[in-house]
Amino acid sequence: MINRYGWQFYHWHIEPSSKCTVKCPRCPRTEFPNTSWLQKELSLEEFKNAFTPSFISEYVQRFTMCGDVGDPIYCKDYLRIVEYIKSINLLAMFILLPMVVTRKKIGGMNLHK
């Protein structure tokens, strides 16, 4: 896939959840509190349908899992999506809000494969 500037897509920024309960300064949710924000999660099935192994091998070198108006940790399939990415041996960066991440939430997941 080529963008309008002729550059190859390879780094995908994914927002697995638009849910968030933290009121970070400068976040659109905080700046515009009377806006009705979408409350959606990306399921593992939706992720697998969008990023099939053949699509990934051709168009993806890495993922960044981060939220723009939500936090990825609120996605119930988040860890399963991470496991799927790891199973394909891709580089993935995860940006989470530290105040909502607990050892229980990330479990015994081996992040260093």
Image (cartoon, rainbow, N blue to C red):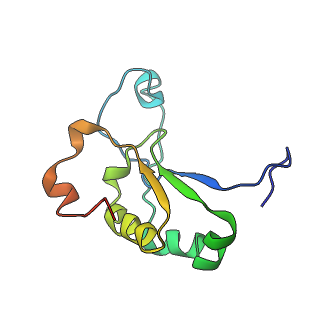
Q: Position of residue 37 (x, y in %)?
A: 47, 41
Q: Position of residue 43 (x, y in %)?
A: 43, 68
Q: Position of residue 85 (x, y in %)?
A: 45, 67
Residue at 71% in and 55% down: 9
- Residue 100, quarter of picture: top left
Q: Answer left or right for 73 relative to 102.
A: right
Q: Answer left or right for 64 relative to 54.
A: left
Q: Position of residue 95 (x, y in %)?
A: 39, 43
Residue at 52% in and 74% down: 48
Judge whether 72 appears above or below 80 on screen: above
| Quadrant the C terminus occupies | bottom left
Residue at 55% in and 57% down: 62
Q: Nearer the viewer, residue 38 or 68?
A: 68
| Quadrant the N terminus occupies | bottom right
The outermost residue toward the left is 104
Judge whether 1 appears above or below 65 on screen: below
- Residue 110, quarter of picture: bottom left
Judge whether 25 appears above or below 104 on screen: above
- Residue 5, quarter of picture: top right
